[in-house]
Amino acid sequence: MINRVNLIGRLTRDPELNVTNNGHTVCNFNLAVQRRYSKGEEETKADFINITTWGRQAEICNQHLCKGRLVGVDGQLRVNHYTIECDCGTEHIKRTEEVTANQVEFLGAPKNKEESKQAANN
């Protein structure tokens, strides 16, 4: 069986870096990825995909990525289910999808001058 996802898209917001209770570093960002479809004429829509990175890669992504940056992501799809209880007392099962990145490749030029300076110094 294979669970592999390859995406190229732009960040919709700046990445968020956190540290878990166990001391693991995690970085989350959202990627807008275009897809084509045909409805008489060929058009494009965007899918918005949550990306999670861990460890040193999380730190690097947080340091060098920003909203609008073009990146390539190679990873695995994770589907999570959880239950929420509404005010009326009924329970609903919610589903979320995310890609856990094995590799993130920075594509294109950085979007701001400070990031350009950091990239040049590394």
Image: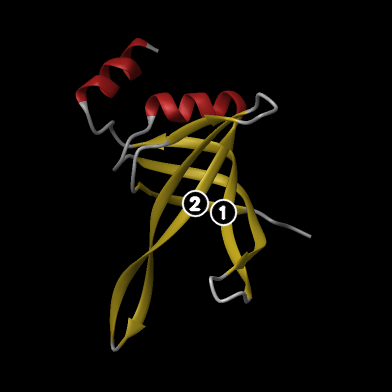
Q: Nearer the viewer, residue 94 or 2?
A: 94
Q: Verify CB contact (< 8 Å) between mark 2 and mark 1.
A: yes
Q: Quadrant of residue 96?
A: bottom right
Q: Secondary structure at mark 2?
A: strand
Judged left or right of residue 76, residue 108 is left
Number of marks drawn:
2
Q: In the rendered image of this protein, does residue 5 appear above or below residue 57?
A: below
Q: Nearer the viewer, residue 37 or 82?
A: 82
Residue 28 percent location from the top left of the image: 49, 40
Amino acid tagged 1:
Glu
Q: Secondary structure at mark 1?
A: strand
Residue 76 percent location from the top left of the image: 64, 51
| Mark 2 / mark 1, whichever is N-terminal | 2
Q: In the rendered image of this protein, does residue 66 appear above or below residue 78?
A: above
**Residue at the farthest left position:** 113
Q: Residues within 10 Å of mark 1 (few under 14, many from 20)?
A: some
Q: In the rendered image of this protein, does residue 62 appear above or below residue 12?
A: above
Q: Which residue is found at the position 62% from the left and 77% from the top?
A: 90
Q: Quadrant of residue 41?
A: bottom left
Amino acid tagged 2:
Asn
Judged left or right of residue 9, residue 89 is right
| Image quadrant where one finds the N terminus | bottom right
Q: Residues within 10 Å of mark 2 (few under 14, many from 20)?
A: some
- Compute the Cα span from label 2 to label 1: 5 Å
Q: Which mark is residue 98?
A: 1
Q: Which residue is found at the position 33% from the left and 35% from the top?
A: 66
Which color mode does the image show?
Answer: secondary structure
**Residue at the farthest right position:** 1
Q: Which residue is found at the position 55% from the left and 28% from the top?
A: 57
Q: Which residue is mark 2?
A: 50
Q: Nearer the viewer, residue 14 or 72?
A: 14
